[in-house]
Image (cartoon, helix red, strand yellow):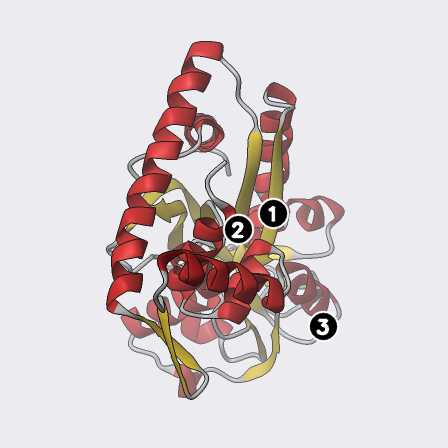
Amino acid sequence: MADRRLQVFHTVARLLSFTKAAESLHMTQPAVTFQVRQLEEYFNTRLFDRTHNRISLTEAGQRVYKFADRIFDLYAEMENAVRDMTGEIRGVLIIGASTTIAEYMLPSLLGDFKKKYPDVNVHLRVSNSDGIVSMVENNDIDLGVVESPVMNKNLVVEECRKDRLVAIVTPQHPLAAKKQIKIPELLEYAYIAREEGSGTREVIQDYLNEQGMNSSDVHVSMELGSPEAIKGAVEAGMGVAIVSEVTIHKELQLGTLVALELDPQIERPFSFVHQKQKFRQRAMDELLEFARAYCLSHRNDD
């Protein structure tokens, strides 16, 4: 509803990149440049300094950006006020989730949410935890769901539930008869790890450090980018791994993998992360409330 030129300018100013703004707005870069130039012509002044393929806000641009922030907050407040009166909940939400959460937690949550709010369109982006936090920081997504601690204190982080990590081996593996194992014994075998930037990898590395071990103590035979790939490699006898317990229910039932409890245990949070926005679209508030209720009902799930 807001002036399109101002929306485009605000996105470029926030990301300090015409290319990233074009991607975020699903526009071509020339179209983004055209909208910004129109606004500069309207104010009869430059809003960006462009030097050596980098841009920065001019003094006028900084002032326009601050007013734009206030204007968009007012628009959101107005829309929420009217929709509170009419009871209408609609719109588009973009959610980002790390791989484990996107594959094993979100399908049921978003399916139930869509049944209750059919006029809300939800788009899902999948990345590792570092990528999701970066998307939230850049306002590329409305809500992130991650599986590792978030260090940015300027973001709102709400823990949903605890997730336990376990070791997995094949039924034929020498360790398969054990119920519990200490990490040094597990790492005597070839280890299959998640990729750099993965929340699972980060949590495991912190655990190793707590146990007095470092990366040189781990014989990583391969690095893979998803829980499904990790499980497949372990099933093929290529090594051992540590994964989220929520990812292996099917394999345990089929008997293709054996889970070993780690001593001491590894737990990590599944958390929602979003910007500190005073006013959000009503659909976002409803999704947060729905997600909180979902987390409460599943908090004690294994």
Under circle 1, the secondary element is strand
Under circle 2, the secondary element is strand
Under circle 3, the secondary element is loop
> Could you tell me if the residues under marks 2 and 1 are in contact, i.e. CB atoms within 8 Å?
yes
Residue 39 placed where, x, y %? 44, 57
- Which callout, 1 or 3, points to the residue nearer the camera? 1
Give the number of the disc on residue 96: 2
Residue tagged by mark 3? 237
Residue at the image position 49 percent from the left and 13 percent from the top: 87
Q: Amino acid at mark 2?
A: Gly
96 vs 76: above or below: below
7 vs 287: above or below: below
Residue 133, image quadrant: bottom left
Callout 2: few (<14), some (14-19), or many (20+) C-alpha neighbours within 10 Å? many
Callout 1: few (<14), some (14-19), or many (20+) C-alpha neighbours within 10 Å? some
Residue tagged by mark 1? 124
Residue 278, image quadrant: top left
Q: Amino acid at mark 3?
A: Gly
